[in-house]
Amino acid sequence: MQIKLSWGPLGYNARAEFWLKGKVAIITGGARGIGAATAKLFALNGANVIIADILDDLGHGLAESIGGCYIHCDVTKESDVESAVHLALTWKGQLDIMFNNAGISGRNGSISTVDMDAIKDILAVNVCGIVHGVKHAAKAMIKRGKGGCIICTSSSAALMGGLASHGYTLSKEAVLGLARSTACELGVHGIRVNCISPHGVPSEMLVSAYRKFLGNENLGPEEVGKIIGESGSLLPGRSGSMEDIAQAALFLASDDAGFITGHNLVVDGGFTSAYSKLSLIYQ
Ligand SMILES: NC(=O)c1ccc[n+]([C@@H]2O[C@H](COP(=O)([O-])OP(=O)(O)OC[C@H]3O[C@@H](n4cnc5c(N)ncnc54)[C@H](O)[C@@H]3O)[C@@H](O)[C@H]2O)c1
């Protein structure tokens, strides 16, 4: 439950309120990491949450603990995503929030030797998976006629080169383009489409990437968080957390973000906004 300040005739009033009371949300990639943190926060705020993932044990367990539902959903398969949306409609009769969050990191290496099958694999999840989610959520929301909110997970890698593999970088940039074009089309139906671009969150995905870069299989989330806090953020000692991204998703999903669409909410500790190595000039 959040304590919120709302603007009233006499100024700001504090009130306790569930931000997503009664809303129905699907979270792809919701079984672990950022998606799982968001599923918990959405549920705490009164939402009915459907976790759509391929990690069945984790997904089932989490869904049970938050009073939600789990569905096996490989986002590369359009019919799986369609089934997840169908589940929302049969379970609660509506879909209010679609968080297209499932993603994979892809293989690193030179563009001169890039494996086209690996590129196709990453695009299948990170781009086609998101197209499937936006398509079927939009279809259900348009049919119901009461608007809705679609959030897609992009990345700091869409804003700055050198942060991830070529395939991942291009896939996350594509997500930004899709969110802008669909925000343009769907606004007339009261459907908002936004992106969140996380950075430096020591999830399984990021930790395993760091293990490979640094050749250290023993690296854990704390160490990765420390590295990011030292060199991947404008806030010394602070890396991203799954909860930081979940809070951003909660805000975008809530009615308080009702005038925000076509936006990319960058949650990166300022990393992509400044060249921090020259910050000495401010001393
Ligand atoms: N961790 C970061 O710093 C960071 C930075 C930028 C963007 N992101 C993005 O955030 C999102 C969540 O990643 P995370 O960091 O929590 O990593 P994660 O690996 O912990 O979570 C990814 C989730 O997506 C699921 N998934 C993968 N392929 C799927 C498929 N085909 N169908 C359905 N689900 C699938 C996984 O099972 C997992 O639950 C991803 O889109 C990722 O690209 C993360």
Image (tube, grey):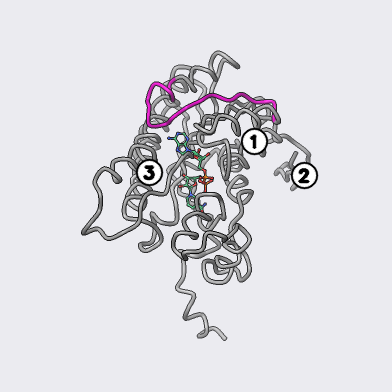
Q: Earlier in the sequence, mark 3 or mark 2?
A: 2
Quarter holding residue 123: top left
Horizontal relation, residue 127 to residue 264: left or right: left
Which amino acid lies under the numbered mark 3 shown in the image of this protein?
A: Val
Q: Nearer the viewer, residue 176 or 185?
A: 176
Return the residue at label 1.
42
Q: Earlier in the sequence, mark 1 or mark 3?
A: 1
Query: Residue drawn at (50%, 50%), measured in percent from left and top?
Result: 205
CA separation in Å, label 1 and label 2: 23 Å
Q: Position of residue 104 (x, y in %)?
A: 43, 44
Per the rendered image, the range of residues in magenta is: 66-82
Q: Residue 13 has which mark?
A: 2
Q: Earlier in the sequence, mark 1 or mark 2?
A: 2
Label 3 crowd (10 A; few <14 / some 14-19 / many >=20): many
Return the residue at label 3.
175
Q: Is residue 106 above or below residue 211?
A: above
Q: Position of residue 39 (x, y in %)?
A: 62, 36
